[in-house]
């Protein structure tokens, strides 16, 4: 037995994730894709819950997406709902998300609320027969499982709001990785920026319990899910959290996930970075790949993969796209709504990401208690 298994943070991880989740590893990664030449899916009429910053950004993505229509919005205040509807040309405004879910004018619900209330709305939408796109993170793996169970029971699709997974760069990386660099040994990810506004809900532990770990740490964990090879067994988790002196919220963290066969994923995230850092670095036995600005794309919607094989000069591969990842997310959601075979791949990605997120969160909390 490795000495690492005796570490208290390791025991905490095993208690939280459970032996079954560890044995499941990360695979399989393969996603069913909408078959080329297949009939286009029906247009989804979207209802948006929330009128905050991300809800305003995604209104434009819905309107740009094929197979999508912005039909309605709900807010706790009718004044806010009507202002959003007027700004984005949505036909209907509600001061109750329950009433919007009950409306026959809506096919799908985008839940852009704080994490603390997201599960209730996602489950209610599924029970109302609406397809569900929930912003990330979710409250816990148990919460994800309850949402997914409701969606399966009521035959609706679920997807989380991770944009970069939908850009064709991610599929290209997965298709070419082994040929470019051989067996993957390391994924390093950084996802950090400076957020000074303490009135932002990210600094409110009541609304966003995991702080920076849930907000930007989610992308670190998703990078592991998307970039590591299939079927790896997770063996240990190391995490150290940082807290904001003013609010007590977690405003950053770093750590490492260790998998079977010596594969590692190192991560760092935070709201306290002197400058933004959004990078994924992948190493293999024959070379390395970088995804600069991995959450975003260029103005022409393309995105780069920089490949270095052995001692050769790096080669830049520019992956073209007709739309940014956020728009493609709503298009992929319409395809998943129309074709149940597409749903498990996206649902499993959400579940694996949340499982890793839960692990680093609880191991980080345990490290705080133990003073390590």
Image (cartoon, rainbow, N blue to C red):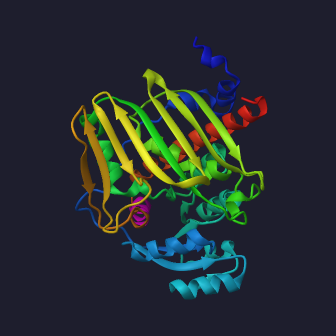
- In the image, taking residue 41 as reference, residue 156 lies left or right, namely right
The image position of residue 369, as x and y in percent, is: 78, 33
The image position of residue 120, as x and y in percent, is: 69, 59
Q: Is residue 74 magenta?
A: no
Q: Decide which of 63, 263 is in the foreground and name it.
A: 263
Q: Is residue 333 magenta?
A: yes
- In the image, taking residue 289 as reference, residue 241 lies left or right, namely right
Q: For residue 136, what is the image quadrant?
A: bottom right
Principal secondary structure, stretch drawn in magenta: helix
Q: Is residue 247 above or below residue 96?
A: above
Q: Decide which of 73, 239 is in the foreground and name it.
A: 239
Q: Decide which of 68, 276 is in the foreground and name it.
A: 276
The image position of residue 141, as x and y in percent, is: 62, 43
Q: Decide which of 114, 145 is in the foreground and name it.
A: 114
The magenta segment is: 329-338
Identify which residue is drawn at 45% across, 59% down: 163
Where does the C terminus fall, quadrant-wise? top right
The image position of residue 64, as x and y in percent, is: 39, 75
As drawn, the residue found furthest toward the front would be: 274
Where does the N terminus fall, quadrant-wise? top right
Q: How many marks?
A: 0
Identify which residue is drawn at 74% across, 35% down: 368
Identify which residue is drawn at 78% across, 55% down: 246
As drawn, the residue found furthest toward the top would be: 1
Using the rendered image of the protein, determine whether residue 341 is visible from the camera's viewpoint.
yes
Q: Is residue 173 above or below residue 1?
A: below
Using the rendered image of the protein, determine whether residue 340 is visible from the camera's viewpoint.
no
């Amino acid at each position: 037995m490795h000495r690492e298994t005796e570490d208290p943070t390791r025991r905490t991880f095993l208690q939280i994730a459970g032996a079954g989740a560890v044995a499941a590893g990360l695979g399989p990664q393969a996603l069913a894709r909408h078959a080329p030449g297949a009939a286009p899916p029906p247009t989804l009429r979207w209802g948006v819950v929330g009128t905050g910053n991300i809800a305003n950004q995604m209104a434009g993505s819905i309107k740009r997406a094929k197979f999508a229509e912005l039909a309605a919005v709900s807010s706790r205040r009718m004044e806010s709902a009507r202002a959003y509807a007027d700004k984005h040309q949505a036909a209907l405004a509600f001061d109750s998300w329950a009433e919007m879910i009950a409306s026959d004018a809506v096919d799908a619900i985008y839940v852009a609320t704080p994490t603390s209330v997201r599960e209730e709305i996602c489950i209610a939408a599924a029970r109302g027969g609406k397809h569900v796109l929930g912003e990330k993170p979710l409250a816990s793996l148990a919460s994800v499982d309850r949402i997914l169970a409701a969606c399966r029971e009521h035959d609706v699709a679920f997807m989380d709001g991770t944009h970069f997974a939908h850009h064709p760069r991610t599929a290209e990386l997965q298709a070419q990785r082994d040929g470019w660099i051989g067996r993957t040994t390391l994924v390093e990810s950084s996802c950090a920026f400076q957020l000074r506004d303490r009135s932002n809900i990210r600094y409110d532990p009541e609304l966003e319990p995991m702080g920076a770990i849930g907000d930007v740490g989610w992308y670190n964990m998703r990078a592991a899910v998307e970039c590591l090879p299939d079927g790896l067994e997770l063996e240990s988790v190391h995490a150290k959290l940082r807290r904001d002196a003013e609010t007590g919220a977690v405003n950053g963290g770093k750590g490492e996930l260790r998998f079977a066969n010596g594969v590692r994923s190192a991560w760092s995230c935070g709201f306290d970075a002197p400058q933004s850092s959004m990078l994924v670095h992948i190493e293999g036995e024959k070379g390395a790949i970088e995804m600069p600005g991995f959450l975003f794309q260029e103005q022409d919607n393309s995105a780069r993969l920089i490949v270095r094989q052995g001692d050769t000069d790096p080669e830049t591969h520019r992956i073209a796209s007709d739309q940014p990842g956020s728009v493609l997310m709503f298009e992929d959601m319409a395809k998943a709504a129309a074709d149940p075979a597409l749903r498990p791949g996206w649902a499993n990605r959400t579940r694996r990401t949340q499982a890793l997120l839960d692990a680093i969160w609880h191991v980080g909390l345990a490290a705080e208690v133990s003073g390590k």
